[in-house]
Image (cartoon, grey):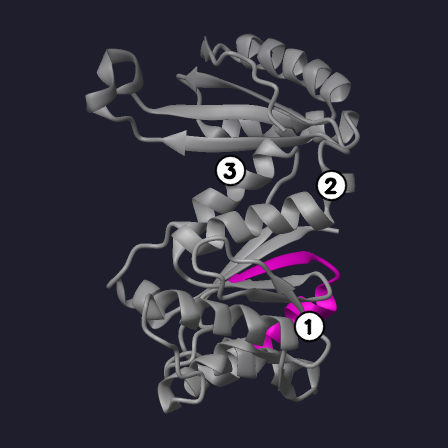
Amino acid sequence: MGFGVIIIGDEILSGRRSDKHLPKVIEFLSARGLALDWAEYIGDDRERITATLKRAFASGDVVFSTGGIGATPDDHTRQCAAAALGVPLELHPEAAELIRARIRETAGDKPADLNAPDNLHRLNMGTFPMGASIIPNSYNRIPGFSVGDVHFVPGFPVMAWPMIEWVLDTKYTDLHHATPYVERSLFVFGLPESRITPLMESIENDFAGVRVFSLPSVGDASRGEVFGRAHIDLGVKGEPEAANAAFERLREGVTALGGEIVEVEPGAGH
């Protein structure tokens, strides 16, 4: 079971707003010993959203979908989720009560007319694909929803982020820190990637489950004399015992190739 995130909204693709969800989801997962496997960005196009959600429902992954669950003409996610599942939308009774409670709260001292057209329209935010369960919203009560392992939250971070954490800490505690994991890296100067590639390949062949990564940089003068030079962020990640042994092989191999090394403090990773 992997983890994925779908970020929906024309405003993200046009640059009108910057996405903040991806780094936050990565942070939430990392804090629980988990990792994000994939992410997709989609505009407000019903066909694309429906096709993407079909893949998500069929993936077997835990997927968070952000955005488009409101009740304005540019919100399509609820309808697309129902279409992807081949089921109708229906007003979720608990969602309806939460929305009515919110209407009463916003009315203040005045009596709330629950049958007013605008308030009846607000109930659309509680129409979910048949069989959905709700995700509580601690900010304003208007819930998100889940169908299986695909979870739908608003685009607003102040609402979405507590809802995502609630899902992780309510439904997937058995996965937290289930797989020990470490990531270690060093900075390599004076070697091109082509010289390092055979070493990387041999490490992945010799250490089952360990992945080697190479992130080259042309250098950044603002980071000082050392990191102003071209270098490679080179490292390994995987199960701690194997990854630590692979890291020693990596360091020895870089030294043998004549590379200059600046080490990064080892962290616990996930």
Tell me which residue sits at (32%, 67%) in the image.
109
Q: Which quarter of the image is occupied by the C terminus?
A: top right
Sequence-first disc among 3 and 1: 3
* Disc 1 target residue: 132
Task: For marks 2 and 3, give the CA distance.
Answer: 16 Å
Locate residue 149: give its quadrant: bottom right
Instruction: Give how far across and how far down residue 110 sits, in percent.
Output: 32, 73
Q: Which mark is residue 173?
A: 2
On whether residue 60 falls in the magenta region, the answer is yes
Disc 1 marks a residue whose amino acid type is Ala
Q: x%, y% of residue 123?
A: 49, 81
Task: Please tell me whether the stretch drawn in magenta is mainly helix, strand or loop.
Answer: helix
Q: Closest to the observer: 237 or 73?
A: 73
Q: Are marks 2 and 1 in contact (CB under 8 Å)?
A: no
Q: Position of residue 102 (x, y in %)?
A: 44, 67
Q: Using residue 4 as the reference point, say whether residue 87 is left or right of it.
A: right
Mark 3 residue crowding within 10 angstroms, few (<14) / some (14–19) / many (20+): some
What range is drawn magenta here?
51-65
Which residue corresponds to the image point at 50% horizontal and 11% vertical from the top-left? 265
Q: In the rendered structure, which amino acid carries the disc numbered 3?
A: Glu
Q: Is residue 156 visible?
A: yes
Specify few, some or many for label 1: CA neighbours under 10 Å numbering under 14, 14-19, or 20 or more: some
Tell me the CA gap for discs 2 and 1: 21 Å
Q: Which residue carries the number 3 mark?
A: 27
Lower sequence index among marks 2 and 3: 3
Q: CA distance from mark 3 to mark 1?
A: 27 Å
